[in-house]
Amino acid sequence: MNASWPAIRFTVNGELRAVSVPPMKRLLDVLREDLHLTGTKEGCGEGECGSCSVRMNGDLVNSCLVPVLQAEGAIVQTVEGLATKGVLHPLQEAFLNCGGAQCGICTPGMLMAAAQLLEQTPHPTLAEIREGLAGNLCRCTGFMRIFESVLAAATQAEPEQPHAR
Amino acid sequence: MSTNPTTRIVGAAVPRKEGVDKLLGRARYVDDIEREGMWYGATVRSTIPRGRIRSIAFDPNIDWSEFAVVTAADVPGKNRIQLILDDQPCLADGQVNHCDEAIVLVAHPSKTRVRDAVSAVTVEYDPLPPVFSIEESEQQETIVWGEDNLLKSFLLEKGDVDSAWATAAHIVEGEYRTGAQEHLYIENNGMIAEWSADRGITVWGSLQCPYYVYKSLLSVFALPEEKVRVVQTETGGAFGGKEDYPSTLACHAGLLSMKCGHPVKMVYDRMEDLAATTKRHPSRVRHRTALDSNGRLLAIDIDLATDGGAYATLSSTVLSRATLHASGPYSCANIRIRSRSWATNSVPYGAFRGFGAPQAIFAVERHMDEIAAAIGFDPIELRRRNFLHDGDTNATEQVMREPVILDRLLDRALSESDYHAKRARYARDNAVSPVKRGIGISAYYHGSGFTGSGERILNSLAGVDVTPEPRVRVLVSNTEFGQGTNTVLTQIASEALGVSYDDLTMAPPDTGAVPNSGPTVASRTVMVVGRLIERASSQLIAMLREHAGLPAPHTREEFFAACERYRAAHGKVESLCRYEAPPGIFWDDQKYRGEAYPAYAWAIHVAQVAVDSVTYSTEVEGFWAVQEIGRVLHPVLAAGQIEGGIAQGIGYALYEKVVSENGHMANNQMTNYIMPTAEDVPPIHVFFEEIPFRHGGYGAKGIGELPHDGPAPAIVNAIRDATGVSFNSIPLLPEDLFVRLCALLPVEEPAIQ
Amino acid sequence: MRGNAETHQLVAPGTLAAVLELLAADPGAWTPIAGGTELMVAHAAGRLTAPRLVSLWGIPDLRFIHATPETISVGGGATFLDLRRNAELAEAFPLLALASGWIGSIANQSRATIAGNLVNGSPAADSSPALLVYDAEIELVSVRGSRRVPYSAFHTGYKRSVLAADELVFAIHLPRRFVRHRQYLRKVGTRRAMAISKVALAATALTQAGVISEIRLAAASLAPFPTRLLRTEAALLAQPVTRGTIVAARAALLGEAQPIDDIRSTAEYRRRVGANLIEEFLLELQQETQRP
């Protein structure tokens, strides 16, 4: 019964949302079940794999470890908020061109971590990329093409040929 | 741009077909999907490795009328998963044979309430003595499977091994062991099932082989063919871990749906997936090798054993591939390979990228370095002297009719990795450095596709059709799980039809919509199914030329116009082709002789390692892989497959250990099952040599599993180079290294020079 | 997800005073939760037995880093990313900044708090060895007032501390007197990132006229709780760094270390590597003292 839980409000991808859910419900589950933003994934529930990564108040967090009450008043970005009006973010463009996504399950979290990295460090070294993505496990790629994608996006000031979708 | 002058799309790095959806977070994996009125299922599992089920009690404090409860008694058809031997029950019936075996299923509309039910079921057992190792099983004192614990055995004999010992200048023996390995796909296993009395059963889920799941559902539910439907959802990694297990999960979800009358979703969490699903077969391989004074192989005698776990599952086919890869890419007139797969009370082992080859190749490639050391030969030279060449016969007396370019691959690998200079430098520097460096190689082949007559038995059917949109659809039951199936098959079709890549789409991976083109395993998709798509496309062109006035050559517009003319006359535009074996394939399944595989991919791997004498940790600092895989159809996807497989192989060698306590995986959390992170993987350098294979799609051979075979032996060979110590068992953790390296160094003594 | 969110109460009073009132009113009834990097893992595993939780997340009274000429004080609610981003702290206490970068990944560091790391009390805690060799002082606060304890006296047993049921860790005070000390910190994990420590060693030392005039050593996973290696320190104090003292230090460490076998590693390995780490540190110290 939703009525028994006081509303918790936060902004997701620029939109103010309100949910009436238990305060200890994980932000991950609120995003996926209550807000129907299924882009963010659960891979481990332990904060190890990073596939649940989102950006909250300017920081990268594992949403499986955030009780939704602690997101009250927060500004949250998920993978669904990366592209703008159908135009791929330079990172998404780079991942597409460089083969940064294979099965795609780690990709939303990986993109969040990469976006966070590039915002903090617009021209990261390979070592900084490795550190910035160390909390996002990818079992398919061996990471090589993910590094390449992030480097490509970093050197790109603006998307050259956006793939409008 | 295509890398080949004769094709525009094949050979070009076209965007991944489903790539944009994945990048936008729009791709729908099974847990992203809801069906109306859906319930949630969960599993009560065995807490002991072997025993009879004495009783199952349901806590009276729970209102069980809210729940659906399923046991073996509810199975309408055969309580057996259909695979090879059909010995594995869908639900334990009276006895459990491994920890975490499924006994009771429960479902409830609430995801949280269903968990209460799991803890409210109490199973009591009369335990039986379990067996946990190859050694225990082969002693046959405790029989846990069949009459004799033996799941499968092979005996492969070429020439006369026993005659060689007397004349040999050198005889070298060795024993090598590999541990279990977990796939660790980032998406756990999951299924949604919907059963209805009139429509039958439909399942949606994370899986590799829709028609495998279909086969089990038919049998477990005793339904006619038209009442079973399997749909693959976007699958977040598989690596063989979703080849057979999904059949069990689909049946579980289906049984619950049947019981409650609602769709049921079952998605495992990581702890359950790690504990209860399949892993790579552990192995023990013993080599005894005779050589002449020139380092030429005179005889190879191998005893190979795998641990199959509690049920047969795929143990026989894994053993087959292990057997056929056990003697390495070497020419030898006398070979004997005795292989056996033993049952134990571990969670059943199953398919995992390489499928027996990583185990066999670890042993033979480690053994080659041990031989080199024992007889005073350089390990590179020893291999060169014994490489297979064109016209030689391998262990099954298959003549190498396709070019074998191992020497060229080796030359390139040594050059790219700067092997000789590094080896010399490390030999000098290690004496005065607390970090010991080493460099090592492995050389091997990987057979593409099913063994021998396997493809004939599969009898795959695949093709293309054209919709009025117009779209061209590829009709296959082969699935995408990251490796690029969707992209490569649509590349092939668009090339062969003369249309654009964007005109192509994949028909849904739904047994109700596509023919059975065989499972997505054994590195067969591009080579075998790609070839079918190529042929079906050419067949369609021929049909349109003959019946719809398609000119030659044609433009894309002319193609679609002809399709519409054809549709007007015939109702639909579709072209299917059935598998045709390449000519001259002869295979004796009893003697294990003949053309074991239609094609081989060849590779040389080089690993550069640093062993830290303070922490005994090994890091791979650089990795080079040079391979010949036929034609490279997509340079980015192909390199991505190699890089990903190498990362898994590095994990197999140095990081990934399944810790088992009384048959239960004790480290069943990602925090304790360790795979390499972005900070751990070395720079991986990939190089391809291309020799088009005329029976593969656009000249391609298999690639998916190839890269997992080479890293472990190359790395452990490099560790031997760095430390002078031979390690013959993986995973090789710092704790294992330190025991050997410090065997003669008292702990009180300073360790660092 | 094996936990049931509906069976837990979580409140966020928003100020330190309000939280302390709650803890005092019903001691032991409310479990503080900050970044959730421990408790939410237990929640997902179905092991979170705390029915009532009080959130410390973002309370400004707890999330600060204050510097004076003598001391840098880190609020208990400061995240490890806060620590890494503070240039003054990184300069005065480089081992702490280094350790902060070893907590999980960036996503964990942005949420894990220093108080949470200490109060969780794992013998493998990443920040503990550095805090011990920096003579950190812990300030505890409750409605009854505040008190300070040396961090070296904070832990009393495996996952047990002097923290009372109504207390919170308010701040960690670090005395700025280690600028000239030779400093060392090395963590040995299962991989380069996202690794729980198998063993770690932190050291701060001063040498004068060729002998060790000050030495502080602390290890992870060589005892049931983070602790100084007092016997090893005693074996080194007032000694020059020679092969002899290295042998003595190894022996002392081996004598006082009590590592265990667990899912991550073995006691023998921890013992051996712990001794190697002290040797590595002493060799570095030796090189340093031999410089003209």
Image (cartoon, coloured by chain):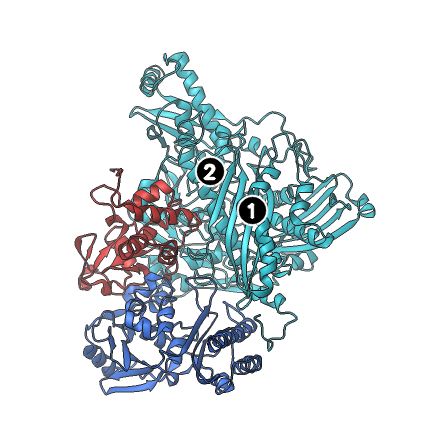
Chain colours: A red, B cyan, C blue
C227 lies above or below B716:
below
**Which label's residue is closer to the chain start, 1 or 2?**
2
Residue A13 placement (x, y as % from top left)? 21, 52
Q: Which residue is located at x 54 percent, y 47 percent?
A: B417
User: In the visual, does B198 lie left or right of C219?
Assistant: left
Of the two numbered discs 1 and 2 in the rendering, the one whose residue sits closer to the viewer:
1
Residue C44, can we see it?
yes
User: In the visual, does C61 lie left or right of C201?
Assistant: left
Between B427 and B694, the one lying in front of the other is B427
Q: Chain of mark 2?
A: B
Which residue bears the numbered disc 1? B605
Extreme-front residue of the structure: C292
Between B90 and B303, the one lying in front of the other is B303
Q: Considering the numbered disc 2 on the image, is that residue within a helix, a strand or a loop?
A: helix
Q: Which amino acid, mark 2? A: Tyr
Q: Which amino acid, mark 1? A: His
Between B593 and C185, the one lying in front of the other is C185
Residue C229 placement (x, y as % from top left)? 47, 82
Label 1 to label 2: alpha-carbon separation: 35 Å
Extreme-right residue of the structure: B166
Residue C137 placement (x, y as % from top left)? 33, 83
Which residue bears the numbered disc 2? B211
Label 2 packing within 10 angstroms: few (<14), some (14-19), many (20+): many
The C terminus of chain A lies in quadrant: top left
Label 1 packing within 10 angstroms: few (<14), some (14-19), many (20+): many
